[in-house]
Structure formats: structure tokens, C-alpha cells
């Protein structure tokens, strides 16, 4: 039985079982699905196809007796020539003097190692007497811990396959196996561990890639269905004519992308189900305008609106901006940690009595004593900055409000539909016309003085600059020292002609907000900072962003930092000071100087860095797939998403007997109530 403890497999005793437990293997099923993390391929290819510096396998006849040289302390070098395709290839082995007695002229040998195309030489890592064996051409290599060896895992898996392979249940209906030409589950498990050819391995991997994506998408989409259907009677009957008049009052026209996102959100608001939607758009793409229209729609439907942001200064800016937009059309209140005493009591009273139409605030909005009268629409800005519990608390503040999560971090589509599979996603991927693009330059460190002179020249015209230091994770102290040193360097360079501010992670929240306030009010000309300025505050006077050691940042982070400038009418600049050693770093700088499109950059960043960078490794909420890779297998992800939607929409899981194994698996492996918020 697959659920039996791993000790029921021949050859696994208590000690080995304890080691396997450390690797997360407790049952026979765990062992069978503990797939290799890579494969060593011993495939003989013609010499003309071998690539310099690659790991290769060749087969040939030894031409003469190997010569053995000793050097250093107990170090040796064994060399001999092998005839391959009528060509003499030199083979070199280090520190394996014993092999001299095993290798004789005329013997056929199979050698695997690093190929030097210029010298026609192989540095041997593994050798075997005799010709290559078809059965050992592809060797599985497992991720191991402790005393466990690859050989022991292989042997244990082989024994488990011999006795339990027939117990593996097929999950996918036959129509999908036929349609996508996928092997059945049991055969694919066997092939993943012991592939007989590259083609077989490719198909087994395809099968598990699709299966993993399909199971994940089914869980996400079932979860979304449950969320939607858990709150009916949630329709907001807003006044379309008032809404159109409100949109017409804007001093600009909405872009097509804004209009499309707005239509999607308004359709959700009209529906009887509770909305859970992610609105993503680049800095300056006009997410706030869309959010304002939605808040107004909710007010005309007789409801209250809420806007939750991560910092007080951002809350204050939104409060001012909303007052400017709404005028006397709505009563707007501000609720942050700084609102205290009598003022706080009055504000809470106004919220409870529905004297306040819109509440703007920080996490102070979700404290126990804040009771909304009839919350219809809630917006969470920069949603990745809030924890799940905080978001849940806001949702529960009213009659299941429609919730819009907003982020200025452009998330590639593959990542968005995976990480936010239980939300609908709207994208604003178009910038308003007439907006000046930020000019981006890559400079070397030896030009820093010229950059400082450029800042001084712009400061004379009332402009401001950020100078950013990298965050060095290994050392908070070093990180702060960097910022402090740079701060003193600038103070000395400008000798009082510019007002310099300093911000870093060790300051308290109040101290950080105070410095940002000074900068936003124009009392600081140059702000030296670590990446704590990355999210949010609108400083219209800031036109220059200088990023020191820019190669230390990912593309998405560089783009977020660049988005701190270019908020006003004047031309803005981003200067990347970098001296990257590797090709990836150089490529990153080149991409940054060539495009201002955040979505394009995020796709490139995903290829260069992987998905962890977007959300932080631990809080990412990204599933860990054993076989699937959502960057390289994005087509399979799209296919699985479409199929999952069709299965749920058409009730196949409940009504079609061929879907029963899938239905049973989902019931046994999905805990919906844990994830509802």
C-alpha cells in the first residue's frame, strides 16, 4: 500500500528510515514521488557535436599504456590516449593512480568528463571499462541528506516500484491523456526514476508538469468559487449617470487600459458575489484614478469605502488627493496611529454613524474599536506589504465588502495567475499620453563627482534627488554604514550648499516618516537612503534617482526605485552606478536603460532571477512544484488553468465518473477553510 510506512520496502531498516524522514519521506508514496533533482546523461555523441567545456561521454580504445606522474603531496596525474572515430583523444585523470593497473592498451573504455575542444582532451570524472551501456545512459541524481547515498535511494525506489507500482491511481481522465499524449501516472513515475531515453523522460516530465499545474489551478479556482458563493446579495446598485459625470470631471481622459480595468471592477461590484480582485499597473499608469471612480460608485450605491495603505505619510497624501478629487461629493476622514484622543473618538464615531463616506488609513483601520456602518468597497494599496491576517480583518469589517488589492509591482502574467490564482487580475499596461519617460543612464563609479555636480545644477532650479545605497542582507550594520558614509561624503562635497537627509532601516517608523515628510515638503534637497523609500510617497519635486552599486538589485526593484521620480512636470533622470562583473549584471543594466515598461522588465527579471524576488522567499505564497517550472512551462500553466476552469464551470468533477479520482484527490488534499482569506 502507498500509505504504508517506508520500512515496509525491502532493504529499508529503522536507521535508513530515520534518514529518509529527514528528507521528508515517511511513506511508500513519499518515496515513489521523491523524484531526482537532476540526471547525469552518459550519451555518446560524435566528436564534431561536442561543445567546449561541456560535460561529455566518449567511448574509445586505449592506444598505449597510461603514464602516471606524482606531484605535490600525494597528488597524481594519469594520462593516456584513446582512439575515438579514428582520432587520438588525450584523457587525463587526477588522483586516481590505482587506475593505471586497470587500464591496458587495446581496452575499450567509456569516459565521462569535461571536454577541451582546443586540445582534443577530456578531463575524466568517471570511467568504465567496456562499451557504453544503453541502460545506464541516463542516471538519476537525488537531493540527499546525512548518510544517505544516491545508490541507496535508487535501490529503495527500485524495490518500491517492483512491489507497489500497481497501487498508483490514475488521476487524469483518459480524454486528457489521449489529447495531450501523456503517459499514465504509474508509467510516468517509473520513468522519472529510471528513464530509458531522453524522449521517455521528456514525456514523463510533461505529464507531471501538467498534473501539478492542473491540481494547483483546480484548488485555486474551487477556492475562488467558494469565496464568491459564500457571499451572495452583495450587488452594489451604483448610479451610472452620476459616475459618468464624475469621470468627465477629471482633467484627463482615461486610457483604454484604465477603462478596461474599471469595467471589470464595476462588473464585479454589480454582481451578487463578493469581489476579490488584484489591480496591477506600473507607477504612474493611473491606478489611483480607477480606484477613485470605484469608491465614488460605492458611495452612490449608499455604501462606505475604505482605503488602507502601508504608511502614515502615504495615507496623508491619499487623503489630500481624494479631497481634491471629490470636493463636496463625499465626506472623507483620515485614521492613522497619529490620530489620537478626542479627534480619534470623533473619527470613529463618524465612521460608525455613516457620517464618513470614505475612510483613508493605515492598519489603524482594522483595530477592534473601528466599526463601519455599511462598508461596501475596500482598497488595499501595495497589497504585498500587508499580512494575510491584516487583509482578513479588513474584509470582516462590514457586510463582506468588495475588495480591490492594488500593486505597483508589475507581476508577470505567469506569476500573477499562479500566486493569485484565487483572485481575478486586472492589468493597466498603458501609460497616460504626454507623460515624460524617465531617462535612464548607466555610469561607472569614477563618474560619481560629475553626477553630484549634475544634482547641484538641478537643485538650483528647485529639483530634488534620491541617492540610494544597496541593502546588504548579510549585514545590517554594514548596510547602514554605507548610507552613513555616503551621507557624510555628500555633506563634505556640498559644504552646506545643499540640504542632505539620511534614511535607513534602523530608524523608527516615526523618524522615517518625519524625514520623508521633510523631503516631500521640499526641506531636504538630497535624500541618502537605503531601499526603504521603495514604496509609495509622491514627491513631485524629485527628478533624479541615483542608485549606487545598482548591480546588486533585481530589475523589478530598480524599476520600483526609478518610479519614485517622474511624478511632476519636469524631465526626470535615473542614474545607475554599477560595475557588474558577470554577464547577468551587465544584461540587467542594458535592459534598464532600454525600457521603461515595468511588465517587460518583470518578465526579464523572472528569467534572470526566478520568482522569489517578487514577493520575498518566505511570504511569496508561491507553490513549490516538484517537476513544473512556471517560468519555462508557462504554456502548460495556461493550458492547465483553462482546463481547470472548464472542469469547474461545467460541473465535470461532480457529474462525470471519469473525474472521480481527481475529485477524491482534491477532497483529501485541499483544506479550503484555511485559505478562504
Image (cartoon, grey):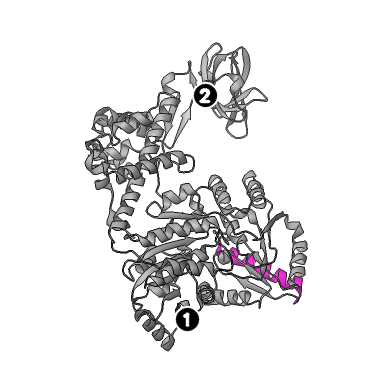
Horizontally, is 106 left or right of 37 in the view? right
Label 2: which secondary element: helix
Q: Is residue 295 visible?
A: no
Tell me where residue 274 appears, x and y as whole percent.
34, 61
Tell me where residue 171 appears, x and y as whole percent.
28, 37
Res 226 → quadrant: bottom left
Question: In this orientation, which residue lies closer to the viewer: 54 or 344?
Answer: 344
Mark closer to the chain start, 1 or 2: 2
Confirm whether the magenta stretch covers residue 493. Answer: yes
User: Could you tell me which quadrant the N terminus lies in?
Assistant: top left
Tell me where residue 61 appears, x and y as whole percent.
55, 13
Confirm whether the magenta stretch covers residue 455. Answer: no
Q: Is residue 292 visible?
A: yes
Residue located beneath label 1 in the image: 338
Magenta stretch?
Answer: 474-497
Marks 1 and 2 in Cβ contact (< 8 Å): no
Res 471 → quadrant: bottom right
Question: In this orientation, which residue lies closer to the viewer: 4 or 365?
Answer: 365
* Residues at marks 1 and 2, CA–CA distance in whole angstroms: 77 Å
Horizontally, is 548 left or right of 447 in the view? left
Mark 2 Cα shell of 10 Å, populated few (<14), some (14-19), many (≥20)? few
Q: Above or below — where is 383 with respect to 56? A: below
Residue at screen point 42% across, 68% down: 297
In the orientation shown, which residue stands out farthest toward the front? 241
Question: In this orientation, which residue lies closer to the viewer: 99 or 107?
Answer: 107
Q: Which mark is residue 98?
A: 2
In the orientation shown, which residue stands out farthest toward the bottom? 342
Q: Main secondary structure of the magenta part?
A: helix
Horizontally, is 670 left or right of 213 in the view? left
Amino acid at each position: 500500500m502507498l500509505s504504508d510506512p517506508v520500512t515496509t520496502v525491502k532493504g529499508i531498516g529503522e536507521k535508513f528510515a530515520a534518514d529518509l524522514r529527514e528528507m521528508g519521506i515517511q511513506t511508500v508514496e513519499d518515496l515513489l514521488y521523491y523524484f531526482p533533482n537532476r540526471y547525469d546523461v552518459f550519451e555518446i555523441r560524435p566528436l564534431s557535436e561536442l561543445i567546449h567545456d561541456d560535460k561529455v561521454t566518449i567511448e574509445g580504445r586505449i592506444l598505449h599504456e597510461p603514464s602516471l606522474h606524482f606531484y605535490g603531496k600525494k597528488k597524481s596525474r594519469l594520462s593516456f590516449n584513446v582512439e575515438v572515430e579514428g582520432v587520438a583523444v588525450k584523457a587525463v585523470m587526477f588522483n586516481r593512480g590505482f587506475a593505471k593497473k586497470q587500464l591496458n592498451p587495446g581496452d575499450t573504455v567509456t569516459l565521462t568528463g569535461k571536454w577541451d575542444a582546443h586540445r582534443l582532451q577530456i578531463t575524466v570524472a568517471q570511467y568504465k571499462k567496456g562499451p557504453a551501456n544503453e541502460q545506464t545512459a541516463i542516471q538519476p541524481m537525488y537531493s540527499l541528506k546525512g548518510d544517505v547515498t544516491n545508490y541507496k535511494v535508487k535501490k529503495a525506489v527500485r524495490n518500491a516500484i517492483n512491489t507497489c507500482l500497481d497501487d498508483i491511481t490514475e488521476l487524469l481522465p483518459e480524454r486528457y491523456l489521449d489529447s495531450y499524449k501523456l503517459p499514465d501516472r504509474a508509467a510516468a513515475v517509473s520513468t522519472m526514476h529510471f528513464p530509458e531515453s531522453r524522449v521517455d523522460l521528456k514525456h514523463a516530465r510533461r505529464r507531471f508538469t501538467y498534473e501539478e499545474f492542473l491540481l494547483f489551478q483546480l484548488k485555486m479556482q474551487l477556492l475562488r468559487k467558494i469565496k464568491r458563493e459564500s457571499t451572495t446579495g452583495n450587488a452594489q446598485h451604483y448610479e451610472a449617470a452620476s459616475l459618468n459625470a464624475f469621470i468627465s470631471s477629471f482633467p484627463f481622459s482615461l486610457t483604454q487600459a484604465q477603462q478596461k480595468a474599471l469595467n471589470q471592477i464595476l462588473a464585479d461590484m454589480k454582481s451578487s458575489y463578493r469581489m476579490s480582485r488584484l489591480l496591477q499597473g506600473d507607477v504612474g499608469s493611473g491606478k489611483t484614478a480607477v480606484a477613485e471612480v470605484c469608491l465614488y460608485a460605492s458611495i452612490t450605491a449608499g455604501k462606505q469605502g475604505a482605503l488602507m495603505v502601508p504608511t502614515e505619510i502615504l495615507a496623508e497624501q491619499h487623503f489630500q488627493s481624494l479631497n481634491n478629487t471629490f470636493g463636496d461629493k463625499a465626506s472623507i476622514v483620515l485614521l492613522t496611529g497619529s490620530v489620537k484622543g478626542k479627534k480619534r473618538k470623533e473619527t470613529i464615531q463618524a465612521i460608525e454613524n455613516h457620517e464618513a463616506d470614505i475612510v483613508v488609513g493605515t492598519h489603524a483601520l482594522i483595530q477592534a474599536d473601528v466599526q463601519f456602518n455599511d462598508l461596501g468597497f475596500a482598497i488595499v494599496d501595495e497589497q504585498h506589504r500587508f499580512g494575510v491576517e491584516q487583509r482578513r480583518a479588513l474584509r470582516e469589517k462590514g457586510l463582506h465588502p468588495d475588495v480591490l488589492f492594488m500593486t505597483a509591482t508589475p507581476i508577470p502574467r505567469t506569476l500573477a495567475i499562479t500566486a493569485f490564482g484565487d483572485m481575478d487580475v486586472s492589468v493597466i499596461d498603458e501609460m497616460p499620453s504626454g507623460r515624460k519617460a524617465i531617462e535612464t543612464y548607466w555610469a561607472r563609479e569614477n563618474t560619481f563627482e560629475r553626477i553630484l555636480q549634475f544634482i547641484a545644477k538641478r537643485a538650483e532650479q528647485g529639483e530634488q534627488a534620491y541617492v540610494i545605497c544597496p541593502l546588504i542582507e548579510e549585514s545590517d550594520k554594514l548596510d547602514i554604514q554605507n548610507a552613513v558614509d555616503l551621507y557624510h561624503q555628500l555633506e563634505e562635497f556640498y559644504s552646506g550648499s545643499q540640504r542632505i537627509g539620511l534614511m535607513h532601516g534602523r530608524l523608527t517608523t516615526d523618524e522615517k516618516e518625519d524625514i520623508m515628510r521633510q523631503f516631500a515638503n521640499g526641506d531636504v534637497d538630497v535624500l541618502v537612503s537605503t531601499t526603504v523609500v521603495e514604496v509609495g510617497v509622491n514627491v513631485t519635486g524629485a527628478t533624479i534617482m541615483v542608485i549606487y552599486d545598482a548591480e546588486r538589485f533585481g530589475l523589478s526593484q530598480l524599476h520600483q526605485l526609478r518610479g519614485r521620480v517622474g511624478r511632476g512636470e519636469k524631465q526626470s533622470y535615473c542614474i545607475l552606478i554599477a560595475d557588474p562583473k558577470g554577464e547577468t549584471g551587465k544584461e540587467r543594466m542594458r535592459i534598464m536603460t532600454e525600457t521603461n515598461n515595468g511588465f517587460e522588465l518583470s518578465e526579464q527579471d523572472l528569467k534572470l532571477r526566478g520568482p522569489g524576488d517578487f514577493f520575498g522567499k518566505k511570504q511569496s505564497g508561491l507553490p513549490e512544484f516538484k517537476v513544473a517550472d512556471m517560468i519555462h512551462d508557462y504554456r502548460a500553466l495556461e493550458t492547465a488553468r483553462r482546463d481547470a476552469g472548464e472542469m469547474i464551470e461545467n460541473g465535470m468533477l461532480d457529474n462525470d465518473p471519469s473525474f472521480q479520482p481527481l475529485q477524491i484527490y482534491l477532497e483529501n488534499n485541499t483544506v479550503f477553510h484555511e485559505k478562504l482569506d
